[in-house]
Image (tube, rainbow, N blue to C red):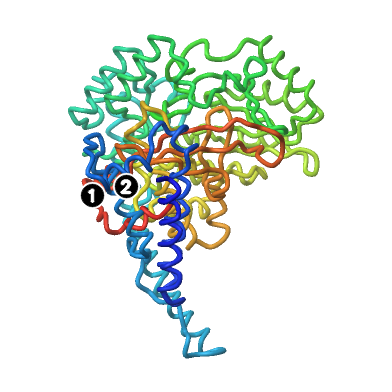
Amino acid sequence: MRERLTHLVTQLENDVYHRVSLANNSSQICARDCARAMRGMLRERADQLAGFSIAQALSDLARGVPRPELQPPFFAELYNILHGLHGRGPNLVLMDIPLETAELRGRAAAVARSRQLDTLWENVERRMARYVSGLEPEVVERRRRRREALLAAFGAAASQWQDWRWQLQHIIQDVDTLAQMLELSAAEREAVSVARRRRVPFGVTPHYLSLMDDHPGECDRAVRAQVLPPLPYVERIAAARARHDRSLDFMLEEDTSPFDLITRRYPAICIFKPFNTCPQICVYCQRNWEIDDAMAPGALALEEQIDAAVDWIRRHPAIKEVLITGGDPLALDDAMLASILDRVAAVPTVERLRLGTRTLVTMPMRITPALAAMIGSYRRPGRREVAVVTHVQHVYEVTPEVVAAVDHLRRQGIPVYNQMVYTFYASRRFEAVALRRLLRLVGIDPYYTFNTKGKEETAAYRVPIARLLQEQKEEARLLPGLGRTDEAVFNVPGLGKNYLRAQQQRDLLSILPDGSRVYEFYPWEQNISQSSKTYVGHDVPILPYLERLEEIGEQAEDYWSIWNYF
């Protein structure tokens, strides 16, 4: 049965290549990709790893054997793959703008194509214009009024707002206080209440609270989703923390921590975590299993622990780059941060200091000229680089204060990079493109676009891998080169970054009855060193994702080519 199905798949693929003209190569590509995916899923090894047999399901369906566990998302996947094998997959053309000048040559052809490219970019601009940034004058004014209202509620002066220490002292963690300052839905209020009652980390800085609109709406959806947790997330986190469940350590950092405060997955870089808290907690934080609460007391490691960790780095001269993160090290005062940087910079084999921080967004007034100058003082051109990596998630988070903070750093010769997490709340057509474009203008280089980690508690945030692949191919690809320099990655537990653009780094194993795709991810050191470890992970189903998009006003038809990205 398995061999006959595999032969049929190959025959259908060949039929499309023979039947369809070269002028319609999208049908050929569709058939090729679907055939490649189906042949992989028909392997016996795929059944063993996935715990489900596509071959058996197809055989049963063909013979009329009841399979009640098979759900609509499964049949949606099957329908689109089978249609793709016949060269009749979903429309692969995002914009019906031909970029061809077959009847012309030379300058005439170039001019005609240039006009077509103008039309194409006008469509891109129109799509990006849907997403309002925090730099728009009406948004700046609206937030000025929000800030005044918050200052009145706190009984504070405008000068205090610009003091990052005041921001830290007034982090909002109590649901009643939050509800006085922000209109909360019933679901939001219940989730925050349960989070505080069950000691799930939560906190919002006054600045970030000012980015949320008086009334929940489309503009601030992504901003709210950053910090206001869904109730299922709260309940799962609370239960796992009560059990001291190691499953919260999704990236298996305990297995890649050779020394206290150190994580090392790659040969020439390590993560150094001296400060284990943040001014504000992102719901889908990778390290929510480690952080007790926003600015929790006792989060700074002891002096002897810091010294011991730095000594470990000194004893491993292969380490050329140290990522100082946590937690957020820029929530420390200047003197403490300088003390840590002094010690790491004193290691002669370290060539790059990298600071991981979200304060540029959550508390941009922290980046004072004095702080930027202090960080920049560790630069030694030709000898040591200092860089900042931040996390801007949406254009609505980008404010004049963010622009000023980045400018302080750039004037000191400090490059700033961005790591975006591709969540549901930032995954509409051209939403991430609008962010990358704006970041470049602000002075932040796009670095990574992370697929949301496959943690059960963050199910509401997850996006099918196929959508990120689609975004990279059909949307990010249209940006000028320097605007799309980021890399799309899936963080594999215990193994590190898996580059999604490289198809040889993963295989599609199966599609489960609920429509979830099952992938096998290969380690980064594949073809570099011997390694037998792989990771089998379950993705989120495509059909429910498209249905959620429709619930917020999107047209599922606009995303149909998602089915043919594997």
Q: Position of residue 161 (x, y in %)?
A: 41, 31
Q: Could you tell which of marks 2 and 1 lies nearer the N-terminus?
A: 2
Question: Residue flagged by tag 1: what amino acid is it?
Answer: Glu
Find residue 222 and report its horizontal and vertical position in percent.
34, 41
Can the viewer see residue 547? yes
- Identify the amino acid type marked 2: Glu
Left or right: 56 in relation to 474: left
Q: Is residue 232 left or right of residue 399?
A: left
Q: Residue 374, can we see it?
A: no
Mark 2 crowdedness (10 Å alpha carbons): few <14, some 14-19, many ≥20: few
Q: Which residue is mark 1?
A: 550
Badge 1, how many Cα within 10 Å: few under 14, some, many 20+? few
Residue drawn at x 28%, y 42% as measured from the top left: 60
Q: Quadrant of residue 271?
A: top right
Callout 2 touching callout 1 (CB < 8 Å): no
Q: Is residue 424 above or below residue 35?
A: above
In front here: 563 or 237? 563
Q: Is residue 412 above or below residue 326?
A: below
Camera-near label (2 vs 1) is 1
- Counting from the top left corner in percent of width and height, residue 217 is at 23, 43
Q: Which residue is mark 2?
A: 141
**Secondary structure under the numbered disc 2 in the rendered image:** helix
Residue drawn at point x = 47 percent, y = 90 percent: 103
Identify the residue at image location x=45%, y=57%.
33
**Quarter of the image containing the N terminus?**
top left
Residue 296 versus residue 164 in the image, above or below: above
Q: Residue 334 at x, y = what percent?
A: 61, 25
Q: Which is nearer the eye, 317 or 435?
A: 317
User: Callout 1: helix, strand or loop?
Assistant: helix
